[in-house]
Amino acid sequence: MRIKKNPNGNQYLLTNQNKWVRNFTKHSVPFIDINDTISQKDHFTFLKNEVQNNLKKYTWIDSEPIYHKNIIIVSDGYDFENKQHLLKNLPKDVTVIGVNGALVKWKNPKSINYYVVNNPYEQCLKYLPRNKTNPKCIASIRTNALFLENYRGTKFRYYPVNESSYSSLGEREVSWQIDDYRNPICAAIGLAYRFGAEKLMLFCCDDSFQDERQGAKKLHNGLWEYPQQETAHGIIDANLYWFKSQPYSNISLGDFSSGAIYENASYIQEEQIHFFWEEGT
């Protein structure tokens, strides 16, 4: 593990895939992502979405007094359709944050409380549920504008931490930003921190698959993933590292996913999911 302090005052952890992940628990520093991953084409797409979404004036999430002690982040990773029933009897004080395809595939009496999205491209539209009222949506200002226009539910926006090479529009109106690395799981982790979570679980937060495919890497459990998924996994795990490194806090991090092991969260067996939320665990 390599951690460095940057002249800008931030701490950054280097993942095994050579991505720097900022310590988002430090408040009195500039919000700067020191990676360099944004292409010129992406610049145009981001700015276009920002213009359209800012015109809609969705409420900034940082202006809302939100507190949730127990949070579970639910994605639609490996075998989600057959695992989501494990969530139907979660304690009432557990807040569910859905990401990726979890909302479209949700068939559960337990409600999703928030849906977090930051995909700037039109492929985001495949995550748009039809013909029903949806949970509160918390979206990056770069999120595909057409998705947000068609989302049926209350919408909030958050400001993502920018890479130094990207100049966004206008004066920032927010008191804090979210380190999302264009990954909704990272965004949800950052929001969970801002919401005051003390217990946080990841559920099906992986992109693994069963059969071998060209260019894929075999995992410890016999499943497979692509290199880009390994990169995303490393960034998520580094965010978990900073989450649990908060001073003066008693943080519990759990994971019920099928991908590579998250080093900074305890793996939770199926029968332990409900026990995880009990006091003292």
Image (spheres, rainbow, N blue to C red):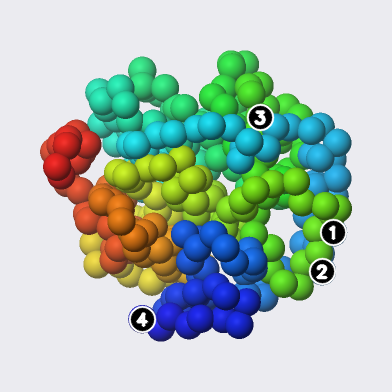
Q: Secondary structure at mark 3?
A: strand
- For badge 2, the amino acid type reads Gln
Q: Nearer the viewer, mark 1 or mark 3?
A: 3
Q: Are marks 1 and 2 in contact (CB under 8 Å)?
A: yes
| Residue 1 tag number | 4
Q: CA distance from mark 1 to mark 2?
A: 7 Å
The residue mark sitting in front, 3 or 2, is 3
Asked whether, in this view, residue 163 is left or right of residue 259, the answer is right
- The mark nearer the N terminus, 4 or 3, is 4
Report the Cα–Cα distance between label 2 and label 4. 32 Å
Q: From the image, state whether disc 1 or disc 4 is nearer to you.
A: 4
| Figure quadrant of the N terminus | bottom left
Q: CA distance from mark 1 to mark 3?
A: 23 Å
Asked whether disc 1 touches disc 3, contact meaning CB atoms under 8 Å apart, the reply is no
Crowdedness near tag 1: few (<14), some (14–19) or many (≥20) residues, C-alpha within 10 Å: few
Is label 2 in a helix, a strand or a loop? Answer: helix
Q: Quadrant of residue 34?
A: bottom right
Amino acid found under the numbered disc labelled 3? Lys
Between marks 2 and 4 in the image, the one whose residue lies nearer the viewer: 4
Q: Is residue 140 above or below residue 125?
A: below
Asked whether residue 51 appears in the rendered view, the answer is yes
Residues under labels 1 and 4: Cα distance? 35 Å
Residue type, numbered disc 4: Met
Q: Earlier in the sequence, mark 1 or mark 3?
A: 1
Asked if residue 135 is positioned above or below residue 123 in the image, the reply reads above
The label number, if any, that marks residue 44 in the structure image: 1
Residue tagged 2: 40
Residues at marks 4 and 3, CA–CA distance in whole angstroms: 38 Å
